[in-house]
């Protein structure tokens, strides 16, 4: 956990850090012995999807078979009136969610609003046995009473600082980068080619 | 001694006398008493019109005033003002008022109102059939005696060929023409725009060009057969122009008119206007090819005159779904600039040819001793500034109704003075109308 | 990430949409359709929004489809069906528009027998207008669901040969379909008796056929239009029996098209008139899928029209 101003841009985690953290989280998930036969990882698009996929591979290596799904929460957001990016992605929950132990996966946990939307959406598919939350990064700043069951790394940073998770599947490399408030307005900076959804984490 | 007015320094364009040169005009009382270079007269008031064009007062042989019956849309007074501002000194108004002008009293009403209003000359057109019902002829001799300049059922095109034959035959004993709005109303169905790509794309029943052409054709045959004469209102299609051209060549006594909107606009303009009902007019705006043909008709004399078909409607009436909107455009205040910029500037017509279409030609068709600046004639005069530019807004119009498709455009060429019987009735610089004494 | 912005304020017709905008609507309908298979067939995105269905022409089918679409997005729906007596004059449309405006509706779906009526409303209303079918002009949501269905069945519309059969003259569906198919690169043949083919339609890029058998060769999609029996008053064809003899799609005629050709109909179908029953209920027919897809397309339309307004830039700052 860091609890100090970010030196912008600052690489907070590199690929080996991320690999290590995900492995540790997988172990933690499997330590909870309940419903191990009904385990499912559901990633919140975009980067949660890739993290969920990695978890499925990791637990498979530990001998546990898990279902995989993705959520696009656009239709469940609470800020529709100010929504600018009108792309609705596809949601893939091809397994029956009823009775499952679902691990909801996201890259950065911030306000908690995305998680609220995702919970609503999963419940509209059916009645899981339980839903847990796994996040690579918890950066604080919650606006809803939501907390993660499994956290890779916690950063207590101020609201005008910003954390970006980059994954090799979409970004070509695995990195967690922090930006100070001075960087927030840096238009055209390569790290700011993010979409609206990334910012809403 | 009556008052004198010297109109000095302008270019006189008088097709009736084949004059186009810098001349002065001396008016005494209501008549022109001099037309030559450098007139001097100490008793006369001088109207300096240097650099302006001076033409005989313009004559519109086809317009709609709404009085009597719909004074909320247009009155004889508002119509007269619109006309005067448009450069017109005489206008022939259609009888489709409420009540219909189908008797002597109707004609007398219009003439007396025009006199009371006191701006320009109104030339009443009487109905050809009672109540425009297309069944029973009006008492024609009384209409003629009362002062009707023509007879017409206008948009209620006479569908009954027998009746049309008898009407034409009967009219040979009078000096005034029938004006026919040529439209086979079975063919035009419930159409509201020209039939073609535009009607197809906009999803309207089309009014096919043949609805006009079949009637033009029939009426030419009837006119020839009855040895009568006929004036065809607002010709709009290529084949109509060709039929009239051929008939004239064969000596059939037909004459014709076109409106400013038909030589200016096409049906594509309606499509681009996004269902603007101000473009809805009868006959409908036609294709580019038809537009080209009516201009050709004007050039070779097949089309004798330009008439406005000025037709006011309230916003409330036009501000509805396209199919429910009434047909009509207010056109009398924009005719002059359209004639200048659409016909004279691109050299389709010479200045002399164009002025003939709105002065001596309509006078000839209606048998009026008007449309000339010759010595001794009544001093109805239009003074034009061909370079004046104005933007066409709602406020530009003196008409009560504002149903013009040209709102938002800038136009060039306007009447600056309109004189009737030797008196200025409209002065554009002051934007003021003056009643005649 | 797809960065196409839906800039249209209204959905008046396919004529106003770009190819990219049409594709955005079609791709947005894909996740919408997925919602139908869930236990809860509803998402909260339009919670608190009010959709007004203003139907001046009776149409259970289209109105219900818009209603279900709105409800699946959690919007409230008000159905307004002005009585026929008050709509013969045009002024009621202005008045109705003003009334709906005052009720703070968020979006208005209008069906009207006057071509251009939605355009008329769009000039006056501050809320978005969806054309639910106007006169013989356009029926954009129907065309979009048709395009969606064709895409689902055939993958891509580009270079497909599509025959539209029947009363083209009075069909707003055909006009919208022709425009849409052309924008997506397909080829359209219109088929019907000369009296039911509107003037100059070939200038829109269609080829015109009067003999159905000639038109069907090499065809991927056969689109049958509904024959309105009341058109008889306009003397456009001798009888329904004769129409059926010449233009009904039956097994024998279907064999003339490509082996995998599909048969579409906007509904409601006159069974045995436009289509024989065996074709209508065969696996070649997409009629019921069109109904399902109609809901997904209309959800996409609501979503895109109500979600627009601010740029991405504005929000990220």
Image: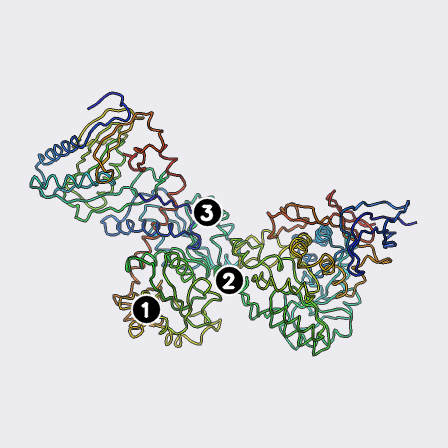
Residue under the image location 64 percent in, 62 percent down: B295
Q: Are marks 1 and 2 in contact (CB under 8 Å)?
A: no
- Name the residue carrying label 2: B199
- Dot in front, 3 or 1: 1
Quarter containing the N terminus of chain A: top left
Q: Residues within 10 Å of mark 2 (few under 14, many from 20)?
A: many
Q: CA distance from mark 3 to mark 1?
A: 49 Å
Query: Which is in the foreground here, disc 1 or disc 2?
Result: 1
Would you identify the image quadrant in which residue A33 lies? top left
The image shows residue B384, relative to residue A114, as above or below, that is below
Of helix, strand and loop, which one carries label 3?
Answer: helix
Measuring from the top left, give residue C277's x and y in whole percent: 29, 71
Image location of residue C185, percent across then percent down: 37, 58
Secondary structure of the residue carrying numbered label 1: loop
Tell me if I can see residue A91 in this picture.
yes
Q: According to the image, label 3 marks what residue? A: C100
Chain of the residue displaying label 3: C
Q: Residue furthest left?
A: A63
Residue C218 got which mark?
1
In the rendered image, the quadrant that contains the C terminus of chain A is top left
Question: Residue at (61%, 51%) from the top-left corner?
Answer: B406
Q: How is the image coloured?
A: rainbow
Of C144 and C100, the residue lying toward us: C144
Which mark is on residue C194? none
Residue B195, position as x, y percentages in the image: 53, 65
């Amino acid at each position: 956990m860091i609890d100090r101003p970010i030196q912008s841009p600052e690489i907070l985690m590199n690929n080996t850090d991320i690999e290590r953290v995900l492995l540790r989280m997988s172990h933690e998930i499997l330590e909870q012995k309940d419903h191990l036969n009904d385990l499912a990882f559901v990633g919140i698009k975009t980067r949660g999807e890739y993290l969920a996929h990695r978890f499925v591979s990791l637990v498979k290596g530990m001998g546990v078979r898990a279902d995989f799904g993705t959520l696009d929460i656009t239709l469940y957001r609470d800020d529709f009136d100010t929504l600018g990016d009108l792309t609705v992605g596809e949601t893939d929950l091809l397994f029956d969610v009823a009775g499952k132990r679902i691990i909801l996966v996201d890259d950065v946990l911030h306000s908690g609003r995305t998680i609220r939307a995702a919970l609503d959406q999963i419940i509209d598919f059916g009645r899981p046995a339980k839903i847990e939350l796994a996040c690579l990064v918890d950066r604080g700043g919650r606006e809803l009473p939501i907390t993660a069951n499994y956290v890779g790394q916690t950063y207590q940073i101020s609201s005008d600082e910003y954390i970006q998770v980059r994954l090799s599947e979409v970004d070509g490399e695995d990195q967690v980068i922090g930006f100070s408030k001075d960087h927030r307005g840096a238009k055209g900076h390569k790290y700011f080619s993010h979409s609206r959804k990334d910012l809403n984490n | 001694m009556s008052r004198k007015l010297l109109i000095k320094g302008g270019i006189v364009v008088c097709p009736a006398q084949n004059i186009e040169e810098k001349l002065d005009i001396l008016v005494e009382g209501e008549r022109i008493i001099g037309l030559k270079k450098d007139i001097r007269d100490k008793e006369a008031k001088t109207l300096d019109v240097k650099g302006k064009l001076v033409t005989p007062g313009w004559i519109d042989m086809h317009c709609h005033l709404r009085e009597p019956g719909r004074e909320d849309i247009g009155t004889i007074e508002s119509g007269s003002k619109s006309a005067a501002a448009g450069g017109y000194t005489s206008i022939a108004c259609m009888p489709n008022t409420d009540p219909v002008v189908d008797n002597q009293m109707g004609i007398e009403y219009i003439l007396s109102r025009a006199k009371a209003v006191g701006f320009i000359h109104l030339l009443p057109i009487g109905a050809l059939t009672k109540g425009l019902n297309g069944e029973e002829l009006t008492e024609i001799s009384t209409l003629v005696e009362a002062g009707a300049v023509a007879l017409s059922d206008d948009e209620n095109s006479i569908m009954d060929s027998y009746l049309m034959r008898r009407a034409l035959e009967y009219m040979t004993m009078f000096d005034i023409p029938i004006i026919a709005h040529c439209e086979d109303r079975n063919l035009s169905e419930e159409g509201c725009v020209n039939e073609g790509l535009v009607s197809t794309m906009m999803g309207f029943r089309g009014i096919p060009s043949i609805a006009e052409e079949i009637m033009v054709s029939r009426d030419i045959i009837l006119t020839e057969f009855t040895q009568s004469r006929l004036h065809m209102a607002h010709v709009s299609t290529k084949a109509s122009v060709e039929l009239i051209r051929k008939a004239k060549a064969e000596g059939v006594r037909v004459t014709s008119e076109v409106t400013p909107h038909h030589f200016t606009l096409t049906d594509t303009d309606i499509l681009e206007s996004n269902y603007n009902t101000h473009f809805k007019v009868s006959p409908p705006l036609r294709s580019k090819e038809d537009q080209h043909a009516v201009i050709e008709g004007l050039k070779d004399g097949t089309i004798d005159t330009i008439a406005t078909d000025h037709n006011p409607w309230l916003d409330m009436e036009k501000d509805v779904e396209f199919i429910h909107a009434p047909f009509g455009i207010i056109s009398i205040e924009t005719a002059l600039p359209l004639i200048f910029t659409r016909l004279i500037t691109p050299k389709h017509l010479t200045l002399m040819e164009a002025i003939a279409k709105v002065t001596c030609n309509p006078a000839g068709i209606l048998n009026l001793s008007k449309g000339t600046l010759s010595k001794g004639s009544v001093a109805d005069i239009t003074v034009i500034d061909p370079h004046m530019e104005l933007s066409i807004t709602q406020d530009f119009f003196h008409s009560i109704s504002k149903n013009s498709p040209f709102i938002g455009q800038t136009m060039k060429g306007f009447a600056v003075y309109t004189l009737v019987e030797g008196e200025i009735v409209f002065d554009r610089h002051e934007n003021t109308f003056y009643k005649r004494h | 990430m797809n960065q196409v912005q839906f800039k249209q304020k209204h959905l008046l017709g396919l004529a106003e949409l770009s190819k990219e905008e049409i594709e955005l609507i079609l791709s947005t309908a894909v996740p919408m359709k997925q919602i139908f298979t869930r236990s809860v067939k509803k998402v909260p995105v339009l919670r608190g929004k009010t959709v007004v269905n203003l139907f001046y022409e009776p149409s259970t089918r289209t109105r219900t489809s818009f209603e279900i679409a709105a409800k699946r997005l959690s919007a409230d729906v008000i159905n307004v069906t002005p009585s026929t007596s008050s709509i013969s004059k045009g002024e009621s449309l202005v008045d109705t528009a003003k009334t709906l405006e005052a009720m703070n509706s968020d979006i208005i779906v209008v069906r009207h027998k006057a071509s251009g009526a939605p355009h008329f409303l769009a000039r006056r209303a501050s809320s978005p207008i969806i054309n639910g079918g106007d006169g013989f002009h356009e029926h954009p949501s129907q065309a979009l669901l048709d395009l969606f269905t064709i895409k689902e069945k055939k993958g891509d519309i580009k270079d497909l040969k599509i025959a539209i059969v029947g009363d083209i003259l009075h069909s707003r569906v055909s006009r919208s379909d022709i425009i849409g198919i052309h924008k997506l690169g397909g080829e359209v043949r219109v088929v019907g008796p000369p009296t039911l083919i509107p003037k100059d339609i070939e200038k829109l890029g269609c080829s015109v056929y009067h003999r159905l058998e000639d038109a069907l060769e090499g065809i991927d999609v056969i689109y049958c239009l509904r024959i309105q029996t009341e058109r008889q008053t306009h003397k456009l064809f001798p009888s329904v029996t004769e129409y059926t003899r010449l233009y009904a799609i039956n097994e024998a005629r279907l064999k003339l098209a490509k082996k995998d050709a599909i048969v579409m109909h906007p509904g409601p179908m006159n069974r045995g008139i436009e289509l024989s029953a065996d074709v209508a209920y065969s696996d070649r027919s997409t009629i019921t899928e069109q109904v399902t897809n109609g809901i997904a397309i209309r959800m996409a339309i609501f979503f895109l029209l109500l979600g627009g307004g601010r740029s991405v830039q504005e929000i990220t700052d």
